[in-house]
Amino acid sequence: MSKYTVAVAGASGYAGGEMLRILAAHPAFEVTTVTGETSAGSKLGEHMPHIPTLKDMIIEPTKPEALSNHDVIVLALPHGVSGALAEKLHADCAIVDLGADHRLESGEAWAQYYGGDFHQPWVYGMPELIVGKDANGEYRRQREKLPDASLIAGPGCNVTAVTLAFQPAVAEGLVKFDDIVADLAVGYSGAGKNLKRPNLLAAEAFGCATPYSVGGVHRHIPEIVQNLRHAAAAISGECDEHTGLGFKNKPEADIQVGFTPVLVPMARGILAVVSAKLSDKGEAMSDESIREVFAQAYEGQRFIELLGVGDMPATANVLGSNAAQVQVAVDRNAKRLYGFAAIDNLNRGTAGQTVQSLNIALGLPEDQGLTTIGVAP
């Protein structure tokens, strides 16, 4: 059987490199073109020596003509770049964007957090995202929108961790929506490969934890709110065609998130701790019943594991995999519900779930070329 040909733009960056690592071992894809800007003209092996099967490929300049004539195009580019480039590409192929340009549904949110030209959203590439309930009370998921999708937007890594940690609580109305707090420990690869500030040097980062993008300015905040609003549509069982909301103009729709990411001295991985005050419904439920909500939400979801009672997610357990470890706990004294998630920011948080979504779009097995097995220690 012939393979799908793939071109990867931004091949020498962390996101592009992780995409290449997965695609190199995927039985249905063949990487035939890699592009970059500052790395153009060099061999891929100079930047990605851990992918020996692709080491002799020459990195071409990122131009539409280099990316065209492929079955799949991967854009692993900074925000503001992939959107403009995508408009110049032919439409008779699948295009996936690992950047932010096609994630947000709101032009106002884009203007506030990113600025520049707003591009229409593509099909969001998080298959397990809850987007409402059907007539039988079963969860509807983003997976339903992915078959035959030709334009796929890869989610943000922090967004993925927060969403998976807390969407069951939101979907069942177990918490109050106006005070959701998310604190994340994030590996340094989340800051990208290019040196931007002295604090990203190993000598500065080793043995140091420091918050960044604090005070409600982090660009992943509107995407987190967007996802949790989709999950909240499950409360009514209905889902608006465009917004995903099932309760327009009701106070429950006012989801507010306080988000603080903290860089910690590890190369990759995210640990999310998300909490909110229990709603009246949540307070009335037992800890066991709340746990069952999470168990039902993730039953049959191949890449998400709800850990046993008392076991906590750990980034070391999921590195190199598309898996997410999830846990839930209730603090009765503080009347708060806590959701936890550990993911690999480059795999599950970026390239892995995008390949998962691409598999669905192309009619391949959803888990093909992906693993739930980590590489710890």
Image: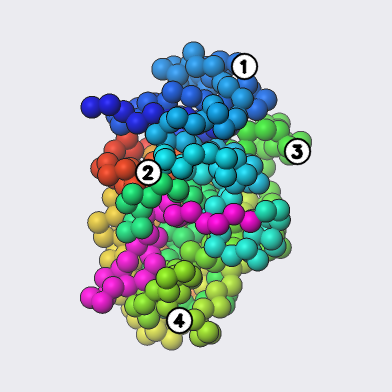
Residue at the limit of the structure toward the right, as seen here: 198
Callout in the foreground (2, 3): 2
Residue at 65 percent of width and 27 percent of height: 37
User: As displayed, is residue 74 above or below residue 38?
Assistant: below
Q: Which mark is residue 197?
A: 3
Callout in the foreground (4, 1): 1
Callout in the foreground (1, 3): 1
Q: Earlier in the sequence, mark 4 or mark 1?
A: 1
Helix, strand or loop at mark 3: loop
* Separation of marks 1 and 3 at Cα, in angstroms: 26 Å
* Separation of marks 2 and 1 at Cα, in angstroms: 29 Å
* Residue 148 shows up from this direction: yes
Q: In this orientation, which residue lies closer to the viewer: 46 or 258?
A: 46
Residue at 58 percent of width and 50 percent of height: 100
Q: Which mark is residue 247?
A: 4
* Separation of marks 2 and 4 at Cα, in angstroms: 31 Å
Helix, strand or loop at mark 4: loop
How packed mark 1 is, by other alpha carbons closer than 10 Å (few <14, some 14-19, many 20 or more), is: some
- Please give the residue where the numbered disc 1 appears in the rendered image: 41
Residue interval drawn in magenta: 118-142
Residue at 43 percent of width and 74 percent of height: 240
Q: In this orientation, which residue lies closer to the viewer: 365 or 280?
A: 365
Task: Name the amino acid, label 1.
Answer: Gly
* Separation of marks 4 and 3 at Cα, in angstroms: 44 Å
Task: Name the amino acid, label 3.
Answer: Arg
Residue 352 quadrant: top left
- Please give the residue where the numbered disc 2 appears in the rendered image: 358
Callout in the foreground (4, 3): 4
- Residue 262 percent location from the top left of the image: 63, 51
User: As displayed, is residue 13 above or below residue 331?
Assistant: above
